Structure formats: C-alpha cells, structure tokens
Image (cartoon, rainbow, N blue to C red):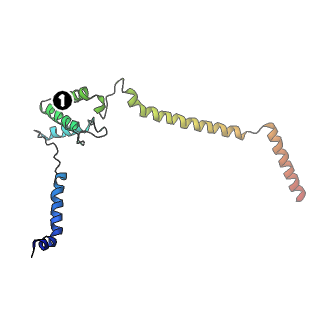
Amino acid sequence: MTIFKLFSRFAPAWVSALLIVLALPVHAVVRDVYNFDTEEKQQRYQVMITELRCPKCQNQNIADSNSPISEDMRDEVYRMMTGGASDVEIMDSLVGRFGEFIRYKPLVEKRTLLLWATPAISVLGGLLIVGGIVLRSRRTNEIDSELSAEERARVEKIMDGHNGKSDSQA
C-alpha cells in the first residue's frame, strides 16, 4: 500500500483531526482567575465588576468585556479588594480615574437628578396628556349633543311632517 492510498483512506480522519487542532486556540481564551480567601469576597468581586461599565465597549460591564481596559479594571478591583479597600473606596477610585460614565447606577446627585427623574416625568406627562384627551372628548360630546333653537325647530318640523305623513297614510 502506498502512502498516497493510505492517506486517501484516512483523509477524512486526518482532516477532522487537523481542524480540531486548529480550532483549539479559539476555545483557549483564558479568563482571569482570582483567588479569594472567602466565598463572600468572591461574590463581592463579582457584584462589583458587573456594576462597572467598560469604558471601551460602552454597553458591557467589565465582567463580560474582553477589552484590555476591562482586564486592567478587573485587576485593579481585585488588587484594591485584597488590599482591604471598601466597595465605596474602589468605586470612587475607578470613577475618579474613568469618570461617572462607568457606573451603571449613577448616584442621585444634583447633576444626575434629571436623569433619575426622567422616567417619572415621562409617566406623569403621559398621564396628563391622556387625561387632557379624555376631558376634551367629554366636552366635545356634551357640546355636540346640545341642539340650537334653530336645529330643534327643524327637527320638530321634520318629526311633525313625518308624523303627519304616517297619520295620513294610516
């Protein structure tokens, strides 16, 4: 058996094995592995990194983002957390470095008041608009149901004529 025949006989297996070997680096993405003393610290870390927005990816938290800046931020959170910093200190440090944008839940302050009040203002505005439409509709129906003296006279004339015809025909 020549080498060519041997290769052609096992070609599908070779191709499959080659494809698997080439695809391995795709699945070999290494996530950050941090060691914590307690499960509580691990959970605290997870909560912290899910509440921080990636400055580069914009709509991902740093836990889900693969950008280098998110990796740096995760490292910084871990470093500060193992150093004994509180959540507020960690958040203040990162906000001071990257800005308020990285918070998914910005603090209620004078400059963020409109941001927090916008949903309530929108609902209230919608209720006022619906209430105005309902009131206007009721007034329009009341006005339309009232007949003027001229219209009443015309209606009575029509009704008398109709009654007169029906009486004469009967």
User: Is residue 14 toward the left or the right of residue 95 in the image?
Assistant: left
Q: Quadrant of the C terminus?
A: bottom right
Q: Relative to 100, does residue 42 appear above or below in the rendering?
A: below
Q: Relative to 129, does residue 21 appear above or below in the rendering?
A: below
Observer-nearest residue: 104 or 88? 104
Residue at point 23% right, 29% down?
94
Residue 82 screen position, x and y as percent: 12, 33
Task: Quickly name the residue at label 1.
Answer: 86
Q: Relative to 100, does residue 31 appear above or below in the rendering?
A: below
Residue at point 34% right, 25% down?
109
User: Is residue 68 toward the left or the right of residue 105 in the image?
Assistant: left
Residue at point 85% right, 45% down?
157
Residue 58 screen position, x and y as percent: 31, 37
The part of the image, by quadrant, that contains residue 38 is top left
Observer-nearest residue: 166 or 136? 136
User: Is residue 11 toward the left or the right of residue 50 in the image?
Assistant: left
Q: Residue furthest right?
A: 168
The part of the image, by quadrant, that contains residue 136 is top right
Residue 22 screen position, x and y as percent: 17, 56
Q: Relative to 86, does residue 15 appear above or below in the rendering?
A: below
Count of all numbered marks drawn on residues in the image: 1
Residue at point 58% right, 38% down?
134
Label 1 amino acid? Answer: Ser
Observer-nearest residue: 154 or 10? 10
Observer-nearest residue: 108 or 18? 18
- Mark 1, secondary structure of its residue: loop
Residue 16 screen position, x and y as percent: 18, 64
Badge 1: residue crowd in 10 Å (few <14, some 14–19, many ≥20): few
The part of the image, by quadrant, that contains residue 31 is top left
Q: Quadrant of the N terminus?
A: bottom left
